[in-house]
Amino acid sequence: MRNFFTNNKANARFTQPYFSLPAKSTAGFTLLEVIVSLGILTIVVLIGIGSLLTIVHANRKAQAQKIVMDNLQFAMESMTRTMRVGTTYHCGTSGNLGTPFDCATSGSAGMAFEKSGGTTGDNDDQVVYELQGTALARSVDGGGTFLSVTAPEVVIDTLTFYVDGAETETAQPLVLIVMQGHAGVSEGERTDFSIETLVSQRALD
């Protein structure tokens, strides 16, 4: 009996299955995986930079357009404010600028008037506004010298003054100003504008 168990134990030592310990893991990134990852990262960075540059360009464009339109608005407000307190409206820039002259239907590309505090009958102190080239120009010496009051980026295509009631003493003179043009130097950044404003002479005490 003892021999039986002894022999069985000895045999069991050789018949039991063999188990080996797992090998130590040495897994990592292959060169191909690194290249693919760097490629994807590069694409993402380029897309981000492109979007950022687009935003910066759009912001600069908006700022430039705002500056240009602010310049145009300031020029119009200055003209209408000076005109509102002026007298002796004269449509056009020819003839005796110190004489009131209407052009309610035909219109003109310029007009003159006596500024507030000016000397009546002295044509050398008349304020004159007219379209010169593509810019709104102003003269304060009766048309002797002109200075542009709009920025070079503002292109005025048409400017028309309609004067009504200047030749009569019973009606309050009115001036209708119609201006059309565009702002911007390139087609992609062009902003068209159309302005129409009515100026009435302030009643004098």
Image (spheres, grey):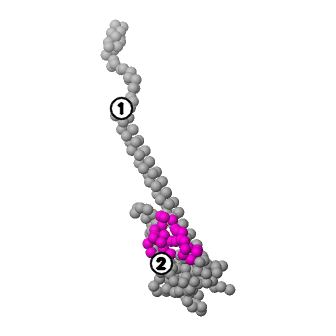
Q: Quadrant of residue 201?
A: bottom right
Check disc 1 and report the residue beneath it: 31
At mark 1, the secondary structure is helix
- Decide: few, some or many residues near mark 1? Use Cα within 10 Å; few <14, some 14-19, many ≥20: few
Please give the range of residues in magenta: 130-158
Q: Quadrant of residue 122?
A: bottom right
- Decide: few, some or many residues near mark 2? Use Cα within 10 Å; few <14, some 14-19, many ≥20: many
Mark 1 or 2, nearer chain start: 1
23 lies above or below 56:
above
> How far is mark 1 from mark 2, CA to CA?
74 Å
> Is residue 131 visible from the viewing direction of this image?
yes
Assess whether residue 157 is covered by the magenta stretch: yes
Count the marks.
2
Residue 97 percent across, percent down from the top left = 55, 82
Which residue corresponds to the image point at 38% horizontal and 35% vertical from the top-left? 34
The C terminus appears in which quarter of the rendering?
bottom right
Is 204 on the left or on the right of 107, as rendered?
A: right
At mark 2, the secondary structure is loop
In this view of the protein, which residue sits in the foreground, 46 or 16?
46
In this view of the protein, which residue sits in the foreground, 34 or 121?
121
97 lies above or below 4:
below
* Label 1 vs label 2, nearer the camera: 2
The amino acid at mark 1 is Leu
Residue 94 percent across, percent down from the top left = 50, 81
Check disc 2 and report the residue beneath it: 109
Which residue corresponds to the image point at 36% horizontal and 36% vertical from the top-left? 35
